[in-house]
Amino acid sequence: MSLRLFNTLSGQLDELTPSDGKTLRMYACGPTVYDYGHIGNFRTFLQVDVLRRTLHLLGIPVRHVMNITDVDDKIIRNATAAGIPIAQYTAPYEQAFLEDLDSLRIERPEQLARATEHIDRMVGLIQRLATAGAAYQAEDGSWYFRLSSFPEYGKLSKKDLSGMEDGARVDLDEYEKDSARDFALWKAAKPGETSWDTPIGRGRPGWHIECSAMAMEYLGDSFDLHAGGEDLMFPHHENEIAQSESVTHKPFARHWMHVRFLLVDGRKMSKSEGNFYTLRDLLLKGYKASAIRLALISVPYRHQLNFTFDGLTEATNAIDRLRTFHQRLITGSFAPGENPALQEAAKKAQADYLAALSNDLNTAEARAPIFDLIRAANTAIDQSQLLAGDRDAILAVLARFDAVFDVIEDHDAEPTRRALEWAEQAGRQADVAPELLARQSFTDEAVDALVAERTLAKKQRNFSRADQIRNELAEKGIVIEDSKDGVHWKRK
Ligand code: AMP
Ligand code: ZN
């Protein structure tokens, strides 16, 4: 099966295959490390994770490059305000970003590339642009891309740029929504700002040139796919195309993937609206990393996701259902043999799941058959009609599901522990939900001891004490399950 993915450049669903016949080479714009990542950023990184995992599931090896923007206007402004060098300012945010990727189980790209470590490549590219007549130096020493030298400008975003002012310039790193102007490739040094001494003068790179330079460094002049949030389509990606194709005269990326922005409670997420959440904010509220992952990937990447706390609760419940069912299959004992109806159901669920993912990464449609299968299998178990061969077939389907969704196996303790540790260091204890604190204060040993006491109470027919312990544990978010082979407990 192959993956059909919407391509912003062609405006249609195109088959995504490695052009070298071996490895799919892809570049995704990474974070600007001036603050903690918010759930909007992570929706985009998660959807790229869904893409790379789906490619792997389809047997396609991936070489994925992501930049870390560790120099830009905001970083310089904030580092200057804090009176520290930019590297000292960005290091903790980069570290936090990588930890957050781990918390959300976003696979690391094969190559992470810091902008400040590729200044030479950017300077080299600007020199080639100058030679080609596509770049010029302004009076203050800054370098600009000459938009009029690239007639195809606008081909990605399909913007009508006929009203464009020739020679008008913009030197901001921040997104400029509607202006098409000569943009800064290199900014001449200003007193007190971080700068590099280079053959094109003392200064620092503009934001757009970094992605062109690093993408071509690691993936070659032409590669298979370029991804990012929808806000980057214009002007950032348009500028990347212009800079790169002006020197190579080859198509830069064949395929462009843009992830739709998320809304929170139906509105644009913003600090001033009070609906702005970092991953850490949500973990401190007591939500599990797996639930956040599932909530952010369950709406397909081209659809608007309206993030709500109800949605997070729905994701939490869905994961509970998955894990409980998985546990039931693993711990249960089933008679040998196969039930043809369940074999058929497992086959169909797997086919529908793969078909949905292959159809433009439709995660919502991919989820549905898995939950249908769980319903059918649970009913069969209740009626003793699920046999050992069915268990194996269904476990294989769940493994394929988890190869992309990655929420069944429970890895939730570590992100929560890390977030709590961070809250303490960052003086954010006030943001920790009381329920979470109560839950965490209960160590595994303490739970084991209470569970043992309950078992003893039941043996002694002291059912009121046994129920009391069960309730006490439930209040701390711990669920006890009695099964044939003993008592199991888990944190909710
Ligand atoms: P930044 O750190 O601002 O450069 O953004 C990193 C990535 O997150 C980029 O691909 C952005 O397009 C993406 N992004 C930023 N805000 C949102 C949002 N609200 N929803 C989805 N993606 C976003
Ligand atoms: Zn970029």
Image: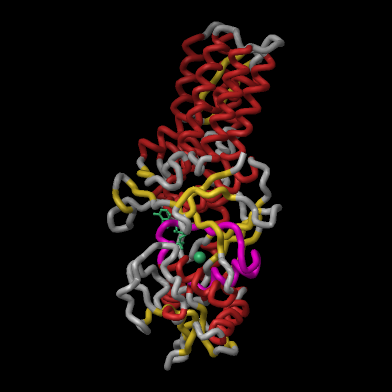
Location of the N terminus (image quadrant): top right
Q: Is residue 21 left or right of residue 412?
A: right
Relative to 474, does residue 283 appear above or below in the rendering?
below
In this orientation, which residue lies closer to the viewer: 341 or 319? 341
Q: Is residue 271 left or right of residue 103?
A: left
Which residue is at 58% across, 40% downward?
404
Relative to 265, does residue 18 appear above or below in the rendering?
below
In this orientation, which residue lies closer to the viewer: 353 or 284? 353
Q: Which residues are magenta?
A: 208-234
Relative to 334, does residue 303 appear above or below in the rendering?
below
Q: Main secondary structure of the magenta part?
A: helix
Which residue is at 36% across, 39% downward?
309
Q: Is residue 56 magenta?
A: no
Q: How many marks?
A: 0
Q: Is residue 96 visible?
A: no
| Colour scheme | secondary structure
In this orientation, which residue lies closer to the viewer: 13 or 106? 13
Q: Is residue 76 visible?
A: yes
Q: Is residue 228 magenta?
A: yes
In the rendered image, residue 85, in percent from the top left (x then y), is placed at 52, 77
- Find residue 233 and report its image quarter: bottom left
Q: Residue furthest bottom?
A: 139
Relative to 228, does residue 72 appear above or below in the rendering?
below
In the rendered image, residue 166, in percent from the top left (x then y), is placed at 36, 82
In this orientation, which residue lies closer to the viewer: 188 or 244? 244
In the rendered image, residue 367, in percent from the top left (x then y), is placed at 50, 32
Q: Is residue 492 left or right of residue 487?
A: left
In the rendered image, residue 366, in percent from the top left (x then y), is placed at 51, 34
